[in-house]
Amino acid sequence: MNCPLRKEETAHILLDYSAGRLDSARGAVLERHMENCADCAAFRMEQAAVWNALDVWQPAPVSLDFNRRLWQRIDAAEAAPWYTRLVESLRFAQWKPVLPLTAAILLIAAGFLFDHPGGRAVVPTAPAATSVSVSEADQVEQTLDDIQLLHQFNAAAAPGNAKAISE
Amino acid sequence: MAQGVNTAMGASPAPDLDAQLMLRVRDGDEESFRVLLEKHRNPVVHFLYRMVQDEAVSEELSQEVFLRVYRSRGTYEPTAKFTTWLFLIATHLALNSLRDGRNERGQVRLDDDGDGDGPAREVADRKPSVEQQMVVQARLWEVREAIAMLPEKQRAAVLMHKYEEMEYSQIANVLACSESAVKSLLFRAYETLRARLAHMVTAGAR
């Protein structure tokens, strides 16, 4: 396979020749080339054989009532209400390939929300912060009471008052 | 969908005869649709049959093709050759059907000769011999298998190129790719066919 004509970019010339679709001028040039090019001559022979093999496959004749059935469908489709037409149009529509894409988008969105919970965490943290501040206030109030009690104790324990306390 | 794709294709310099007929259909001329149907019914059914390899499915899909053509008549614009549009619809339906696996059941295989349809198959007397008939059927089965094993796009390209004799530009429009991509598809497809049918090729060359 050394001839450049047999490469993917140019092989259509050989295919066209085998299919009888190459114009006579170019066909003549190619024939002269194939007289000296074993590669292209082999390609022509193989392609012609494939072409003949494909000719063997002739489909069965179309049903005799094809037209009648088609007109029945056309009449039914024309008379059908809008929602039936919609269902019919969806039956062969190209929406199925969208399903994996939709699933992928939903998956990515779910992953994003799972990975970035900040938006949702603000709400539950607020009451927790409030409860902490309440307990802190109690603690502060108790500390103040303790300090006041300590002041009273200190005042009572002062040297001038010690005797009075002992008496 | 059909009309949407139709308008998306590249403009051609002048409307072809089929497109002119379709324009008449758009104007309410049912007879022109009948003419188009008669002209293109067999190519469409045969193309679809070779694509899905099931007679019943291919006829159902063909009906859908012409039904869509008829229902799109009101918005039809001849932006491309009529046959390009027609085979675009047919190819889309065939590919959808293959992907849905709708043609898996009820497939008429050449190797299940003798099932049902007895009288229709009992025509061996007209054949030269049973042996020759078997050889022909075996070759046919191999060709069908070789085509069926091609990737969907390659298969569609080969069928349009070989049996419908469509130009590269038309096939490119139908398959929504460039002409060079079509040439590449065809090159690879025929290469595969040459390899798969090599023994037939050799036998034929002898």
Image (cartoon, coloured by chain):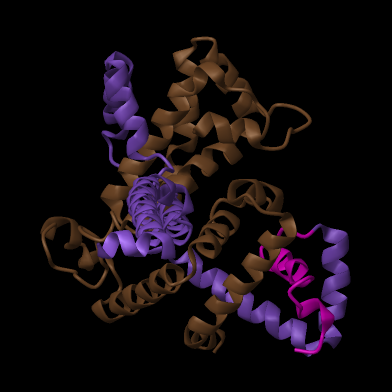
Chain colours: A purple, B brown
Answer with left or right where residue A80 lies relative to residue B149.
left
Residue B46: in sight, yes or no?
A: no
Q: Position of residue A135 (x, y in %)?
A: 33, 52
Q: Position of residue B204 (x, y in %)?
A: 52, 83
Quarter holding the C terminus of chain A is bottom left
Q: Position of residue A127 (x, y in %)?
A: 34, 46
Q: Magenta stretch: residue B151 in it?
A: no
- Which quarter of the picture shows residue B181? bottom right
Q: Give B196 or A117, whichever is nearer the viewer.
A: A117
- Residue at image position (66%, 51%) is B172
Q: Position of residue B15 (x, y in %)?
A: 70, 26
- Residue at image position (48%, 48%) is B91
Q: In the rendered picture of this protein, how many numbered marks are placed on residues?
A: 0
Answer with left or right where residue B194 lies relative to residue A142.
right
- Residue at image position (24%, 77%) is B130
- Residue at image position (80%, 89%) is A2
- Which quarter of the picture shows residue A160? bottom left
Answer with left or right where residue A34 lies relative to residue B112.
right
Answer with left or right where residue A157 lies relative to residue A23.
left
- Residue A80's place in the image compared with B189, above or below, is above
- Residue A143's place in the image compared with B134, above or below, is above
Over which residues does the magenta segment extend? A1-22
- Which quarter of the picture shows residue B11? top right
Q: Give A30 or A126, whichever is nearer the viewer.
A: A126
Residue B27: in sight, yes or no?
A: yes
